[in-house]
Image (tube, rainbow, N blue to C red):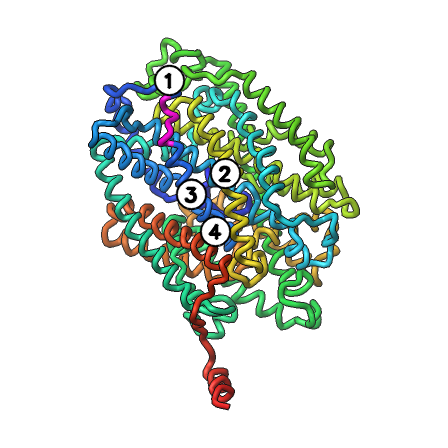
Amino acid sequence: MDHNSTSINNRKPEKAHDIVCADDHGEETVEKEEDQSVEKSFESKEVPPWQKQLTFRAFFASFVLSVLFTFIVMKLNLTTGIIPSLNVSAGLLGFFFVKIWTKFLEKYGLLKQPFTRQENTVIQTCVVASSGIAFSGGFGSYLLGMSEAIAKTSTEANDSQNTKNPALTWMIGFLFVVSFLGLFSVVPLRKIMIIDFKLTYPSGTATGHLINSFHTPQGAKLAKKKVRSLGKFFTFSFLWGFFQWFFTAGDGCGFVEFPTFGLKAYHNKFYFDFSATYVGVGMICPYLINISLLVGAILSWGIMWPLIEKRKGDWYSATLPSGNLHGIQGYRVFIAIAMILGDGLYNFVKVLGSTLLGLYHQIRDKNTGSAIPVGSNSSPPNTPSVSYDDERRTRLFLKDKIPTWVAISGYTIFAMISTATLPHIFHPLKWYYIVVMYIFAPTLAFCNAYGTGLTDWSLVSTYGKLAIFVIGAWAGASHGGVLAGLAASGVMMNIVSTASDLTQDFKTGYMTLASPRSMFVSQVIGTAIGCIVAPCVFWIFYKAFPDLGTFGSQYPAPNATIFRGIAILGVEGFSSLPKHCLTLCYVFFIGAVVINGLRDIVGPKWARFIPIPMAMAIPFYLGPYFTIDMCVGSLILFIWETVDKAKALAFGPAVASGLICGDGIWTLPSSILALAGVKPPICMKFLSRKNNARVDTFLGN
């Protein structure tokens, strides 16, 4: 609800079925900067050749930031699955780190190459590609969904042929053989996407304008102020996480269990848990996302689940543990799945229709001679509408070509390697399943990349769920269909996700005059870093927190349960659902489609008052506690905008990024402490007056 390139901006891209939020100010920036020529202000600066855009300092900074952002994305993946766009933070921190580096060298007369916007773009691309693997790698979804811990929540398909526990070696090997295919699949289409079809790629365009602004004198001053704000709130967030740790000596201890609205509301998960991360996420996500989450939380945990729990012993067995999918947990998971599938199917059809219609118009217009730059070096004559900026960007974008044979050879080689390798990692995933997926994958990757360019929507999870159903049903329940479906989902999601990410980065490079070759190399290196760093970071979480993936734990990994539930539905059918659950699933599936249709019918003016089903579905499983945090973030931003809108627009994303980064990086020392067996000294719990009296009596005796 999606991947990092995926950012929801009044309902923007979806990565897997996670929401990925971006700030609302990118488009406004684009509009303001288009009023004047950007490239004329850089006319006096020489554009370095593509080899010089790839510097040691750029990749060193990228590696450091990749580790930081991977911890952040991994923590978000394993808690709620709501991931903010980190493009702005990556670009801003990359600018800050290398600027300090170059200032130091310049002071001692050792600076040989100045810091350019092209190098800044390389850093941003590498960092986002690397941290994106923490999402598309499935550590909080399909990959963890294969484990025995998740499988035990259901009695269906939990045998050995349908489970596979995480291990560092096979996870790294799996990512290396599937993560590069998407990059090669869209490289031959970069000119068609960016130049011929002139797709907007709003997130990539906004990031390009942001990086351009950093490298102007005024923008550099503002960037320093933003970095200073990010640093202040990073420090506060990190120290706040450290302070909270002292009070978490046992289960149900600490500020995260603070019964803000009373014990009854706390029982239904309505409380503020003092998470700086999700306050920051709430500041980045559009107001509509946060309100949709709150509506879903009230509908589920405030109304539906209390009513269904009264049917315990009738609709489901009263003796089942709370996490069993045949009990109340089944309603939470499968109704959320129904809403996610309804929303995903509607938007898949909608975006696919827009893609096909857009392609038809593009081809028709090109045939009538109205398309621009299709030449190899510059725009054709008699096209006065082409601006100076577009003419210069097009010329340099077409200058450093990536040979088509490189893309075809790369795709073929990696496809052959993975076809031979994957059946040894996942035995139920036969080689001919993989061949079929690789035949259709480039088409799906193109559709997703094109749709992202038109709408900024990345329907990665929809393609993943499609693979689960098709390959899972093909394999069958008795032949490891659940494991085969989850593995197929991982293959498809990695291809489609990296394809749309790369085209977004090509657009950013087009805006900053970064060479397509340097963009491609940076993406490849970032992906390689991610294939190693992401599994290692996940392994730290996996070893430090034995209850990882357990409902109600510190890291419940809700998407893992949901993905496995989808796989079970694909191979077992509806027999696994509790009583009346199927009827409720139909209602919410249709409801998601109707709500989306209504949003499109009424138009943007009124759609901003109608909640988004995909966002509503998340708290159905997890509960409202993180929603309260995000609404607090929205409230802070709203008050700030009321008092000083210009300052809020300029510094809001930096403050939010600081809150997210500080709390996210605290997970590294907290994990190390857990691995070392160091436990917090204090347990802070909240009891009712009656229970407190009983405890006092017991202790008095």
Q: Give the distance between the C-alpha atoms of the residues marked 1 and 2, in whole angstroms.
A: 29 Å
Q: Which residue is mark 1?
A: 396
> Looking at the image, how many numbered discs can be counted on the residues?
4
Q: Which residue is mark 2?
A: 530
Q: Quick one: 12 or 523, which is closer to the camera? A: 523
Mark 3 or 4, nearer chain start: 4
Give the label on residue 85, or none. 3
Q: Give the distance between the C-alpha atoms of the residues marked 4 and 2, in whole angstroms.
A: 16 Å
In the figure, 432 relative to 425: above or below? above
Give the label on residue 601, or none. none
Q: Position of residue 568 (x, y in %)?
A: 70, 50
Q: Is residue 511 visible?
A: yes
Mark 1 or 2, nearer chain start: 1
Majority secondary structure in the magenta region: helix
Q: Quick one: 140 or 7, which is closer to the camera? A: 140
Q: Give the distance between the C-alpha atoms of the residues marked 4 and 1, in whole angstroms.
A: 38 Å
Q: Which residues are magenta?
A: 52-58
Secondary structure at numbered mark 1: helix
Q: Which residue is mark 4?
A: 76
Q: Give the distance between the C-alpha atoms of the residues marked 3 and 4, in whole angstroms.
A: 12 Å
> Which class describes the residues within 10 Å of circle 3: few (<14), some (14-19), or many (20+)?
many
Mark 4 or 2, nearer chain start: 4
Query: Going by the picture, which residue comes out furthest to the right?
Result: 478
Q: Say which amino acid is labelled 4.
A: Leu
Q: Quick one: 502 or 228, which is closer to the camera? A: 228
Q: Give the distance between the C-alpha atoms of the residues marked 1 and 3, in whole angstroms.
A: 28 Å
Mark 2 or 3, nearer chain start: 3
> Which class describes the residues within 10 Å of circle 2: few (<14), some (14-19), or many (20+)?
many
